[in-house]
Image: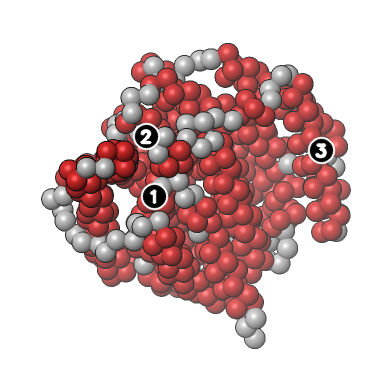
Amino acid sequence: MSANEAEETRDVAAQGGVVGGMTVLSRISGLARDVALSHILGAGVAADVFFLAFRIPNFFRRLFAEGAFSQAFVPVLAEYRERRDGALSRGARGGNPSQGRAAAGAEAALRTFVAAMGGNLGAALLVTVVVGVAGAWGLVALFMPGYFDDPAEFALAVDLTRIMFPYIGFISLVAFAGALLNSAHRYAVPAFTPVLLNVALMAAALVAASQASPSPEGAAYALAWGVLAAGVAQMLFQGPSLAFAGLLVRPKPNWRHEGARKVGALLVPAVVAASAGQINVLVSTVLASTLEPGSVSWLFYADRLMELPIGVVAVALGTVLITNLSRLHRRGLDEEFSAMLDWGLRLGILLGVPAAAALVVLGFPLVATIFQHGEFSARDADRTTIALVAYAIGLVPLVLVKIAQPGYFAHQDTRTPLKYTVASIVVNIGVSLATFRWLGFLGLALANSAAAFVNAGLLLRGLFLLGRCRWTSRLGRTVFATSAATVAMVAGLLFALPGREEWLAMGLALRIGWLGALVAGGFVVFVLLVLTSGIRLRDLRHRA
């Protein structure tokens, strides 16, 4: 076995652990960032405008940095890496000049492909950024119609959008670099990179708070510049790791390159297919701009709490799955392909179900403890909790979507997930339009969950019909054990949970201690019951 092959057959759970660990750090720092934002912005008009303006570049951050670009790029990159690694392996064994030349040619082909992709992406991003900055007025009119009749709020939204829009270019290049590193099984640096955005925004929040006469509007401007600075820092941070991996190649646009054209054909469907959740949140945000002040902020803060379990479970699994499934498909290892998807589903269910239940039960304690201070009121906490519970209903389907989509993308099939994504977006828009006038922001959050169920159901049904995933006894045992343990955990949490007024009467230190005890106690109950059912740690390990 070659060194490359040995590297690729590492414990996949360990790879997921690396990504998950770094993602936990990213989400925790993101939570600290959101605490700072809630303190200086609260949930008023300035907060709504900033979150709406930030939604545009943040949409692209989640879209590209959390997998959509990789879904199209990595399977094609895997072809070039397989050819390169195979040629190097044969050259090492054979030692004759022709095999050496073949290995050198395969290495050159890989680098040429990377150079073409980097050049094409850079050129497209430059045009996009210039057009976006110049057309910020139109973007605000499109995505923030609720502020069109207020000149001051509209002008603030245009300014913030113009400052933050170039972040799209930086974060897309970061995603490109991250996909290259992930393909080489170097997961830590790409998974850590989002922490830099959180650090930059916390620094900007401190600068805003230190002003002689701080205002929410001034804080919004400081945070916008923090977003732009973070984009530059994230891009530069990837450079040394790319160089160390031998993947730092000078970009050279080549729109006719065979591999680049293949990625281009896959990219648009992959982007839409992988972005259902973000498109649905964006639709909710646009409609929320027409509702009562604070609606955008309540949805934003609730979505941020959802990001912790989704990032740790779904994004980590999706990142590892797309790389390894692409390699297994290239080698024709169908049984191993199915086994890996089974592993992903079992782990996603085991982690996602209790996380969703905990968010529903502990919603108000979480929101009140984390966000209720400074400009963030008890009323804001109540409404954010309502949005969080509605979002949490769709958490497990969102996790399953991230796990199921690589089962298609690894086969370079982006059209099937695209159809399912369009169906889920139609459901989201339909439910949103039918409910947001009489349920307000709650209707928008429920529409997101309904769309997630549709997308996950269609994706999983397709995988089972195609034979790429099968119902196994291990999967059934995991579903049963997880469900039973979650019910017991919820019962225990409800028994120990204080009432709303009791919680509000507590000081911050007591809230934190009680919340920590509830989370730890629920975790212990869940783990013990899962172990009692026969699930063991070794069942969650998988080797590609």
Q: Whole-percent x and y of residue 272?
A: 34, 42
- Please indicate whether residue 160 sits to the left or right of residue 188 in the image: left
Distance between the Cα atoms at labels 2 and 3? 41 Å
Q: Whole-percent x and y of residue 424?
A: 40, 33
> Which image quarter is the N terminus in?
top left
Q: Which mark is residue 206?
A: none
Residue type for callout 1: Ala
Q: Earlier in the sequence, mark 1 or mark 2?
A: 1
- Please indicate whether residue 113 sits to the left or right of residue 325 in the image: left
Residue that extends furthest to the bottom in the rendered view of this protein: 212
* Disc 1: which residue: 179
Quarter of the figure with residue 416: top left
Q: Nearer the viewer, residue 267 or 156?
A: 267
* Disc 3: which residue: 521
* In this rendering, the label closer to the viewer, 2 or 3: 2
Q: Whole-percent x and y of residue 535?
A: 68, 22
Give SS at disc 2: helix
Would you say residue 455 is visible in this rendering?
no
Residue type for callout 3: Gly
Distance between the Cα atoms at labels 1 and 3? 38 Å
The residue shown at (27%, 68%) is 130
Q: Nearer the viewer, residue 97 or 215?
A: 97
Is the residue marked by circle 2 packed among few (<14), some (14-19), or many (20+) residues within 10 Å? many
Q: Earlier in the sequence, mark 1 or mark 3?
A: 1
Q: Nearer the viewer, residue 96 or 256?
A: 96
Quarter of the figure with residue 460: top left
* In this rendering, the label closer to the viewer, 1 or 3: 1
* Disc 2: which residue: 327
- Please indicate whether residue 406 sits to the left or right of residue 87 in the image: right
- Proximity of marks 1 and 2: CB atoms separated by less than 8 Å: no
Distance between the Cα atoms at labels 1 and 2? 14 Å
